Image (spheres, rainbow, N blue to C red):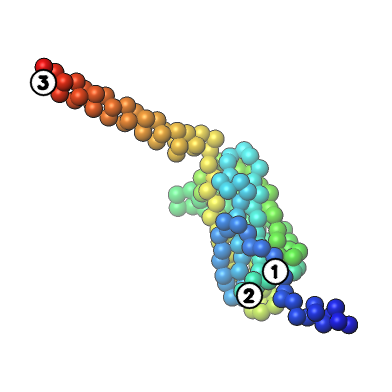
Amino acid sequence: MLASGLLLLLPAAFADPLQNAYKQRIGNYDVEMTTEPKSPTVGAPASILVRIAGVNGDDLIDIPIRIALAKLGGDTVQEIARTNPIVVPYGHYTYEHTFAEPGRYVLYVYLNDYAYSGQTLQFTFFVNVTGPFDYYLYVAVPAALGVAAAGAGAAFFMKRKKRQMESLK
């Protein structure tokens, strides 16, 4: 009896939100999305983690959703994957996908809000997928340019110092 009374005094336990996740709130729902790895790469499997919670932070149980994945290309959006209805247990769902092309993708989470509005709510998240050589374009090339600039600066400084030394003679 005493133990059950103490349990009533304890605060409700909520699952941790997803780390580094994008979050959207529509109506009574907070939906979070993140990917593992953080920057998906072409040809490598990626996990898309989705968390569905109430606005007060508690994970919701048995929420029906559908997921659609589309690739952005200029002015067009081309759907590349769609799930059948999924019942999300305990507020968390992991969707596995291997991207075939680099670019910007849109992940749509359609939540069937049978509890409040009776409507289907659309949550929209963007995913950037890098190609296998994008690392070199964003990290190696600027680093190489920085080394080249440092070398040119050092050569200029040494040449200037040499002229100053010759003028003193």
Q: Which amino acid type corresponds to the residue marked 2 in the rendered image?
A: Asn
Across and down, in percent, residue 74 comes to: 45, 49
- Quarter occupied by residue 85: bottom right
Please name which of the two marks, 1 or 2, marks the residue nearer to the observer.
1
- Quarter occupied by residue 32: bottom right
Mark before the other along the chain sequence, 1 or 2: 1
Q: Residue at x 66, y 79 (%)?
A: 116
Residue 167: give its label: 3
Q: Secondary structure at mark 3?
A: helix
Q: Secondary structure at mark 2?
A: loop
Task: Choose between 121 and 90: the one closer to the eye.
Answer: 90
Spatial CA distance of label 3 from label 1 is 76 Å
Label 1 belongs to which residue?
A: 14
Label 2 belongs to which residue?
A: 56
Spatial CA distance of label 1 from label 2 is 10 Å
Q: Quadrant of the N terminus?
A: bottom right
Spatial CA distance of label 2 from label 3 is 76 Å
Q: Which amino acid type corresponds to the residue marked 3 in the rendered image?
A: Ser
Is residue 6 in sight in this rendering? yes
Across and down, in percent, residue 109 comes to: 62, 62
Mark before the other along the chain sequence, 3 or 1: 1
Please name which of the two marks, 3 or 1, marks the residue nearer to the observer.
3
